[in-house]
Image: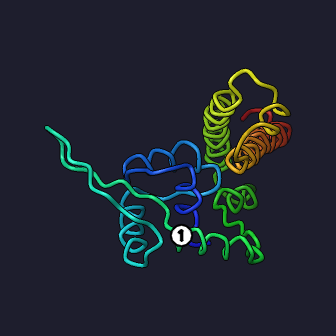
Amino acid sequence: MALRNAILATLLEGESSGYDLAKVFDSSVANFWTATPQQLYRELDRMEGQGLVAARVVEQERRPNKRLFSITEAGRAALAEFTARAPKPTAVRDELLVQVQAVEHGDAAAVREAVRKKQSVAERKLKRYERLRDHLLAGRTEADYLAAAGRVGHYLTLARGIAFEQENIRWCEYVLGVLAQRDPTS
């Protein structure tokens, strides 16, 4: 998947500056796609040149002018074409998994610490995703939200991010439990 498709999907929510797009990527799209602000700005410039997004300049006092980007009809067509293709299989490349696989031949304490850190990061992400879900639901049940919302894609990807972090936490607890049973002094 190209970064442009993630940007186009995000711009379906409405016009956005590059700065605001970077915040959205960090807070909500991060459950399935990451990009640095520099990558976003470069890609937005490319996409504007390709006619996939349009930019307008908003003049500001006491701050630099900002550009607001919106998806064009060509961008919508490109996104529709992207959604019609079969997705590529997900490839897992996780350095921690290699460390866990080699735990008996390496620094077991360092591996346990890395697993603890992954668990802590997953717990923080999960809390952030759950707060976002609560904000989206705004006191409604999930069923009511899904029945009434104009668009549900954002909610569905958020649900996947929540499940992913829950599984990360469960797996970390499992690994730490197994390693503690094998070496109770750890």
Residue drawn 39% across the image and 71% down it: 48
Total numbered circles: 1
Residue drawn 43% across the image and 75% down it: 51
Q: In the drawing, does residue 93 fall left or right of residue 18?
A: right
Picture coordinates of residue 25, whole percent (x, y): 51, 50
Q: Give 1 or 61, whichever is nearer the viewer.
A: 61
Q: Is residue 93 above or below residue 26?
A: below
Picture coordinates of residue 98, whole percent (x, y): 70, 63
Residue drawn 57% across the image and 55% down it: 12
Q: Is residue 173 above or below residue 16?
A: above
Q: Give 82 or 132, whichever is nearer the viewer.
A: 82
Say what amino acid the circle numbered 1 marks.
Answer: Glu
Q: Give 54 or 105, whichever is nearer the viewer.
A: 54
Query: From this viewpoint, which residue is outermost toward the front?
Result: 73
Residue drawn 27% across the image and 55% down it: 57
Quarter-of-image position of residue 86: bottom right
Q: Quadrant of the C terminus?
A: top right
Residue assigned mark 1: 73
| Secondary element type, mark 1 | helix
Query: From this viewpoint, which residue is outermost toward the top?
Result: 139
Quarter-of-image position of residue 80: bottom right
Q: Quadrant of the N terminus?
A: bottom right
Q: Residues within 10 Å of mark 1 (few under 14, many from 20)?
A: few
Picture coordinates of residue 105, whole percent (x, y): 71, 60
Q: Give 160 or 174, whichever is nearer the viewer.
A: 160
Q: In the drawing, does residue 29 fall left or right of residue 140?
A: left
